Amino acid sequence: MPRTSATHTQSYKLKNIVVFASGSGSNFQSIIDAISTGSLQASITGLITDRDQIKSIERAQFHNIPYTILSPASFVHQSVFESTLLNQLEIYNTDLIVLAGYLKKIPGKVIRTYRDRILNIHPSLLPKYGGKGFYGIKVHEAVLLNEEIESGCTVHVVNEVYDDGPVLAQSKVPVYKTDTASDLASRVLIEEHKLYPKVISEYLKRIP
Ligand code: GRF
C-alpha cells in the first residue's frame, strides 16, 4: 500500500523570530536574506522598534513583515510599557528575540519571561568595549584610541546586564593604523552579517 505523504512529514515546526531594531537594520536584512536562501530555517513574525522613520521599518514593509513601534518614553509607567511589549511578543508567537541594533534597555520582566531566548550582537570582542555607553561608532572609536590590533563582533545571550550574557560566538577582524572608526565599523559589520544568521540557526536547534 502506498504510503501517504503525511507518513513522511516531519512534525518540525519553524521557530518564530522577533527582531528588535532601532536603526538601519542591516543585521535584520542579513537574517531576512538567510531565511530566503534557506540557510536559516525560521520565520520572522515581527519587528519591534522604538522609533518610526527608520530603515528597518522600510525593510519590514518591503518583506511584508509586521512591525510595531513602541517607544518606552511614550509610556508614563514603565510597567505599562513592559506589559504592552510582552503582549505584543505573545501576539507574534515569539520563540526567539533577536536584538539587531536595538538601543533601548530590555525590561527585566521581558528578560525573565524570555530567559535564554534573547540574543544580541555587539560590534566588539566582548568583554572588551561592552557595557553602558559602548554602542555604535563609540565602540570603534575606543578600539582605535587604544591602538588595538584586532577587533570583531560577538553574539551573546542577553541577561539583565548590558553586553554581559554568555558568549555564543565571535568573529575577528584586523585593525589597521590608517583606519577611521567608520572603516572599522564597516569591516566589523561585514562579519556581523555572516556570523549572526549562523549563530541564530545553531541556537534555534538548542531551544525547545
Ligand atoms: C551593529 O553594529 C550591531 O553590532 C550593534 O548595532 C549595529 C546595528 O547595525 N548592536 P544595523 O542596524 O544592523 O545595520
Image (cartoon, helix red, strand yellow):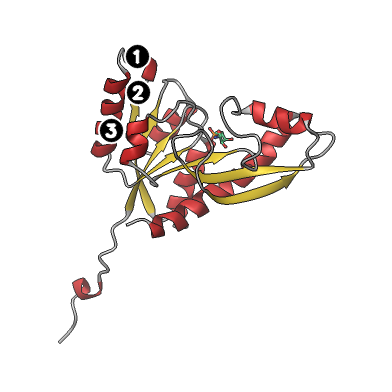
170 sits to left or right of 72: right
Amino acid at dot 1:
Ser
Q: Mark number for residue 86?
A: 3
Mark 2 surroundings within 10 Å by alpha-carbon count, few (fewer than 14), some (14 through 19), many (20 or more):
some
Eye-nearest disc, 3 or 2: 3
Residue 3 in the image: above or below residue 125: below
Q: Position of residue 23 (x, y in %)?
A: 50, 27
159 sits to left or right of 176: left
Q: Which residue position is annotated with label 1?
A: 74
22 sits to left or right of 133: left
Residue 108 in the image: above or below residue 95: above
Q: Quadrant of ligand 1?
A: top right
Q: Are marks 2 and 1 in contact (CB under 8 Å)?
A: yes
Residue 46 visible in the shown view: no
Q: Nearer the viewer, residue 172 or 22?
A: 172
Q: Mark number for residue 70?
A: 2
How much space separates mark 1 and mark 3, taking CA atoms?
A: 16 Å
- At a point 44% along the width and 20% down the height, the residue shown is 53
Label 1 or label 3, whichever comes before in sequence order: 1
Q: Position of residue 27 (x, y in %)?
A: 52, 40
Q: Nearer the viewer, residue 36 or 141?
A: 141
How much space separates mark 3 and mark 2, taking CA atoms?
A: 11 Å
At numbered mark 2, what does the secondary structure look like: helix, strand or loop? loop
Residue 47 visible in the shown view: yes
